[in-house]
Amino acid sequence: MKSVFSALLILNYILGVQSWSPTDSYAPGPIDCPSDKKLTRTADGLSDEEVTWLEGRKTISNDNLIAFLEHANMTDFDAADFVNNKANDTIKIGIAFSGGGYRAMLCGAGQLAALDNRTTGAWEHGLGGLLQASTYLVGLSGGNWLVGTIVMNNFTDVDTILREGKIWDLSHSIVNVGGIKVWETYDYYKNIEDALDEKRDAGYDVSITDTWGRALSYQFFSKLNDTGAALTWSTLQESEPFTNYQMPFPIVVADGRTPGTTIISGNSTIFEVNPYELGSWDPSLYQFTDVKYLGTKVKDGEPENGKCIGGFDNAGFIMGTSSSLFNQFILQINTTSLSSAIKSILSSILNDISNHENDIAVYKPNPFFDTDFGTKSITNNDTLFLCDGGEDLQNVPLAPLLQPDRQVDVIFSFDNSADTDGYWPNGASLVATYQRQFLPQGNGTLFPYVPDVNSFRNLNLTAKPTFFGCDAKNLTSLLNSSVTSSKGSIYDTPLLVYTANRPFTYWSNTSTFKMSYEEKEKLGMIQNGFEVASRLNNTLDPEWAACVGCAIIRRTEERNGLEQSQQCQECFARYCWNGDLDNKYAGVNFTDAGITNGTEDNGGRSLNAGFSLTLVGEQKTSLIKLMGYALLVTAVFAISF
Ligand SMILES: *[C@@H]1O[C@H](CO)[C@@H](O)[C@H](O)[C@H]1NC(C)=O
Ligand SMILES: *[C@@H]1O[C@H](CO)[C@@H](O)[C@H](O)[C@H]1NC(C)=O
Ligand SMILES: *[C@@H]1O[C@H](CO)[C@@H](O)[C@H](O)[C@H]1NC(C)=O
Ligand SMILES: *[C@@H]1O[C@H](CO)[C@@H](O)[C@H](O)[C@H]1NC(C)=O
Ligand SMILES: *[C@@H]1O[C@H](CO)[C@@H](O)[C@H](O)[C@H]1NC(C)=O
Ligand SMILES: *[C@@H]1O[C@H](CO)[C@@H](O)[C@H](O)[C@H]1NC(C)=O
Ligand SMILES: *[C@@H]1O[C@H](CO)[C@@H](O)[C@H](O)[C@H]1NC(C)=O
Ligand SMILES: *[C@@H]1O[C@H](CO)[C@@H](O)[C@H](O)[C@H]1NC(C)=O
Ligand SMILES: *[C@@H]1O[C@H](CO)[C@@H](O)[C@H](O)[C@H]1NC(C)=O
Ligand SMILES: *[C@@H]1O[C@H](CO)[C@@H](O)[C@H](O)[C@H]1NC(C)=O
Ligand SMILES: *[C@@H]1O[C@H](CO)[C@@H](O)[C@H](O)[C@H]1NC(C)=O
Ligand SMILES: CC(=O)N[C@H]1CO[C@H](CO)[C@@H](O)[C@@H]1O
């Protein structure tokens, strides 16, 4: 085993791919420490790397923004003059995708496609070019499966993924990838087990999130021969579309949680993982660590004996951390009726993992061990515990975009949550984020006023895109009600464009725990997502692109004391929440035509409620076929052992 490793290491040096795992496998391994030694820093500003990177991105995003705004047919508006002369520094656009399993990933894929100029039709009848004009791209859980898949695959695009058909093969559930081809499922688990063994042999604890992360990688990194076993998150730093500033700055959101505790938005520690760092802006940590050196044993950020580790930040592991709620799937496989050989290999995987709570990802050694800032429960422990970013109810990952240091002008947020009985969003995530600013953990971030969840539905705020914080002046009162004084000005509080999942051409309210999608279901979800983001391909409002432009330029106008054009005033009258409430009862949502009416229709779809793994029809059928394959399987196993 050792000799194989060193042979691979040498090969690695020859090929010059040191940024992937140093062992060229799932196991972390030694790498050189950075020259300035300390791996942590306080969260009192952006990292130098991010600042430098933003300078480069600006040169690309500004030109793309001008092109987008010119195409948007805004009246009385000179895009080039505005962007070059009025927006002193640069207009920063953030995009955020919520969690919600594959539903969130697929709805989000369509929504992202509508903003991506590489998508066929996005320029003509979508918001094509907005992605190219953006600065930040944030994902959480299912939304992060989307963001992670796109950015880690060299910033591929949704059209290409669908055309090539390799990534996002969801025709079989992640626990039974081979379907009736049991030997494929067996190989799959065998490979996962081998990867876990490699990490364990290298001296690291392995948690259920390792299994989950490796399993996800089969769907997301299926173009790589090792399905991403050696692919690290920090690979992004050297990935061409990142160093060329072709992609926005990607950020993953997860929560901190120690076993045995519950978290709410008020006391969660929100973690972000960006291409350079992992950490939190919240007072309970207020630190970042260099993501590339995760796995290094540190004391107050200093590597012990000057030795550093790389390869711990496996891309699938980071993506699995953000969605660790779904660890349950792997655990419950044992209760399903898969073949006993598959079960036995699974049991050996599951019995060997460390016995922490199942929805928690174990980062051991703790990169923040014995540091000065933050709560002792985080910094005194040899392990850092992270969990699904949505567990604190903030299912739309806005925190990274609300940091005054980032100076985001406008956030396009896509909420594909399942808040209501019918699995539609109702703004609950925004309410949680709104309330957090008044608590110590808010730490001076500001967030616009939003109504209660009943009003969200009764006022049709989930039925079409809604703008929040349209007048920055109206946010002044927030400055005084915050427990900590804000670092930024009201103009650094982004305007929020909120777009909720809703049906146009497809019933996109599938269960969060639906684990397999047939091709036509997958395409239906994605197409509907495109239509959600584009207001049904610009047919519901031919001025939609112009109104989006009005939202983008708003903060710059306000900072410069510029009046809105007549067109923008009309747009704002259509799309801004004006402060009304209607919270007497929870109204119901969504007809076929995508409007709000009296019934919570599910379009005849049978919904798979609840958080339990039940065998879906496809698996039941394959079970019967499975038996027929028993003989063959026995033969395959005889060969494998
Ligand atoms: C702007 O107007 C032109 C001409 O009417 C039209 O071809 C184009 O599609 C419009 N752009 C958008 C984004 O609606
Ligand atoms: C532009 O930004 C710089 C640095 O942030 C500042 O010094 C300058 O006053 C700003 N100019 C305008 C016109 O706002
Ligand atoms: C909207 O545009 C997308 C992308 O071009 C296309 O796939 C879809 O069919 C269009 N929807 C309708 C209702 O025309
Ligand atoms: C988007 O693509 C069109 C052609 O399809 C091009 O004219 C336009 O400049 C592109 N816009 C951006 C922002 O890249
Ligand atoms: C990204 O592109 C580089 C260079 O072409 C290639 O080596 C690498 O395998 C690609 N990564 C993925 C995830 O496809
Ligand atoms: C992946 O495997 C295929 C087939 O075995 C091989 O042709 C290809 O060169 C491999 N790619 C890499 C990057 O190793
Ligand atoms: C967070 O708050 C909830 C509700 O008040 C409480 O039950 C929980 O123990 C708190 N968690 C932590 C980690 O403080
Ligand atoms: C799975 O089931 C087997 C036998 O039924 C049992 O021995 C094993 O402990 C179970 N594993 C888990 C993780 O529940
Ligand atoms: C670390 O946290 C875990 C879970 O709360 C706890 O069981 C363990 O005792 C802690 N270790 C230390 C050294 O505090
Ligand atoms: C919400 O939409 C429905 C259907 O279009 C409409 O009847 C109702 O008046 C709208 N409610 C509000 C408050 O705009
Ligand atoms: C902002 O405040 C003004 C004056 O109180 C009010 O007329 C306006 O409707 C408010 N705007 C929003 C978006 O709430
Ligand atoms: C703006 C603000 O209140 N920032 C605070 C965030 O938390 C850290 C750590 O507690 C403080 O040092 C900052 O002043």
Image (tube, grey):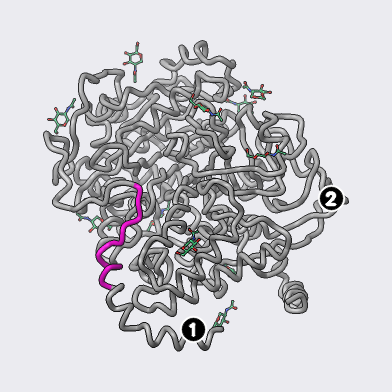
Which residue is rendered at x = 21% and y = 19% of the image? 584
Disc 1 secondary structure class: helix
The residue located at (48%, 67%) in the rendering is: 218
Rendered image: mark on residue 35: 2
Identify the element where label 2 is drawn.
loop
Whole-percent x, y for residue 319 in the image: 52, 53
Q: CA distance from mark 1 to mark 2?
A: 50 Å
Confirm or reject: label 1 Cβ below 8 Å from ligand 8: no
Image quadrant occupied by the N terminus: bottom right
- Locate residue 3: give its quadrant: bottom right
Which label belongs to residue 637?
1
Determine if residue 111 is in view: no
Q: Going by the image, does 591 lie left or right of 356?
A: left
User: Is 442 on the left-hand or right-hand side of 543?
Assistant: right
Name the residue nearer the viewer: 498 or 300: 300
Q: Earlier in the sequence, mark 1 or mark 2?
A: 2
Residue segment shown in magenta:
611-621
**Residue 394 x/y as whole percent:** 44, 35
Q: For this rendering, which residue is in front, 395 or 335?
A: 335
Residue 637 image point, x, y percent:
49, 83
79 or 301: nearer the eye?
301
- The amino acid beneath tag 1 is Phe
Rendered-image quadrant of the C terminus: bottom right
Report whether 182 appears left or right of 350. left
Classify mark 2: residues with Cα within 10 Å, few (<14), some (14-19) or many (20+): few
Does residue 511 sit above or below 229 in this rendering? above
Q: Which mark is residue 303?
A: none
